[in-house]
Amino acid sequence: MTLPSTTATVGTDTPIRIGVVGLGWFGTMMAEQFAANPNVRITNVCDRDPARSSELAAEYGIASHTDHRALLDSEALDAVYVAAPPSQHRQIVLDAIDRKVHVLCEKPLAPTGDDAAQLHAAAVGSGVVTAVNFPLQYASVGVGWRQRRSERFEGSLTCIEILIRCPLWPRPYQNVAWVGSRQEGGPIMEIGTHFVQLIRSLYGELRIVDAHVRWPNDSDRSEQWALARMELSDGTPVVMRVVCGVGGDESVSITCDGENGSLAMLEWGQLSEARPGTPFRTSNEFQPSSVIDEFCSVVRWGHGSIVDFAEAHAVQTVVDGLRQGT
Ligand SMILES: NC(=O)c1ccc[n+]([C@@H]2O[C@H](COP(=O)([O-])OP(=O)(O)OC[C@H]3O[C@@H](n4cnc5c(N)ncnc54)[C@H](O)[C@@H]3O)[C@@H](O)[C@H]2O)c1
C-alpha cells in the first residue's frame, strides 16, 4: 500500500491529486470541474454503484473503486472530494483524515450536529485541510452580497426572509430517495443549510427564537412545512417559511431589507438590489470565485477562502434546531 502524501504539492504549483467519492448528480458535475481545472488532477473515482464508477473512470482514463477505503489507499493522493449522501460523509471523512488526506466535503457536513461535531473534532490538529462546499460562498450572488455588505448598502437591517417553496419534494432534478428521507434529506437540510451558511457568513450568529415543523405520518419522510423565527445578534429578525407538496411554482429566495436598501437572491439567481420604493435590479457585475481554486490555495499555500469544519458544524447546529422545532 502506498501511503498518500500531502507534502508533494505544498508550496508548489503542482496539480493537487484528488479522488472523488460519490458520482451522482453533484459528484459527476464537480468531477467535470476538477477535470477542467489545471490546479487539480483527478486520480481515481469511487461509487457504490460499480457501473457508475467504471463509466466515469473510463471517461477520464483513471482508476475506479466501489469502496472509499480502496480509493484512499490505492495511490498517493493529496485530497478527496466527498459527494456521497450526507449520512455517508462521516465515515469517509474520518477515514481520509486518518490517512492524512485533505478533504473537500459536500454540504451538509453531516446529517446531525453531533456527527458534525465529531468530524470537527477529528479535523482539529489533524494537519489536513478540511473544507465544506457551500457554493453560495463562491457564486457571484455571494461575492456581490459580501461587497454590498462591506459598503453598508442595506444600512440598518430591518428583517431577513427565507422562502423555500417546493411543490414537489424531492425536486424532479434531484429525485433520489435519500433527499426525501427524514434521516438525511428534506428541504431544511438540503436547501436551508445553504441559506443558514450564507446569512452567518454575511451577518454573523443566528439564534432560533421559535421553530415549528410539520412531519408527515410516514416516519421515513422529510418535513412538509416549517415556520421559524430566528434573530441575529443585534436582534434583527430572520424568518423562514418552508412548504412542500402544494400547488404553484417552485420558489426559493432569501431577502434582506434594510433602512437604506434591500438585497436578495431570487430563484438561485444573481444578486438583486433595490433602494427603498424601487424595484429589484439584478447585478451581473460580480465575478464568481471557485471553491476548487480556494481549496487548492489553502492546501498549497495555507491561505484561501474556504468554509471550514468549525463553521460547517455551527451551521449544522442551527439546521438541527430548525428541524427539531421548539
Ligand atoms: N453544493 C451544492 O449545491 C449541492 C447540490 C446538490 C447536492 N449537494 C450535496 O452533494 C451530496 C450528493 O448529492 P447528490 O444530489 O449528488 O446525490 P446522489 O444521490 O445523486 O449521488 C450520490 C452518489 O453517492 C453514491 N454513494 C452512496 N453511498 C456511497 C458510499 N458510501 N461510497 C461511495 N459512493 C456512495 C451513490 O451511489 C450515488 O451515486 C449531498 O451531500 C448533497 O447534499 C450539494
Image (cartoon, rainbow, N blue to C red):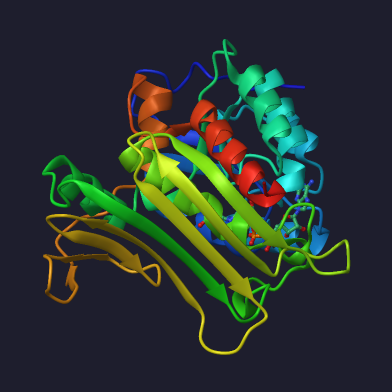
What residue is at 66 percent from the left and 19 percent from the top? 122
- Image quadrant of ligand 1? bottom right
Closer to the camera in the image, 192 or 58: 192
What residue is at 27 percent from the left and 53 percent from the top? 158
What residue is at 38 percent from the left and 23 percent from the top? 300
Vertical arrangement, residue 321 with respect to residue 179, above or below:
above
State which quadrant residue 321 falls in.
Answer: top right
Name the quadrant of the N terminus.
top right
- Residue 110 visible in the current orientation: yes
State which quadrant residue 254 falls in.
Answer: bottom left
What residue is at 60 percent from the left and 89 percent from the top? 247
- Measuring from the top left, give residue 267's x and y in whole percent: 40, 72
- Measuring from the top left, give residue 103's x and y in whole percent: 57, 32
Q: Is residue 161 left or right of residue 89?
A: left
Vertical arrangement, residue 288 with respect to residue 243, above or below:
above
Q: Is residue 296 left or right of residue 190?
A: left
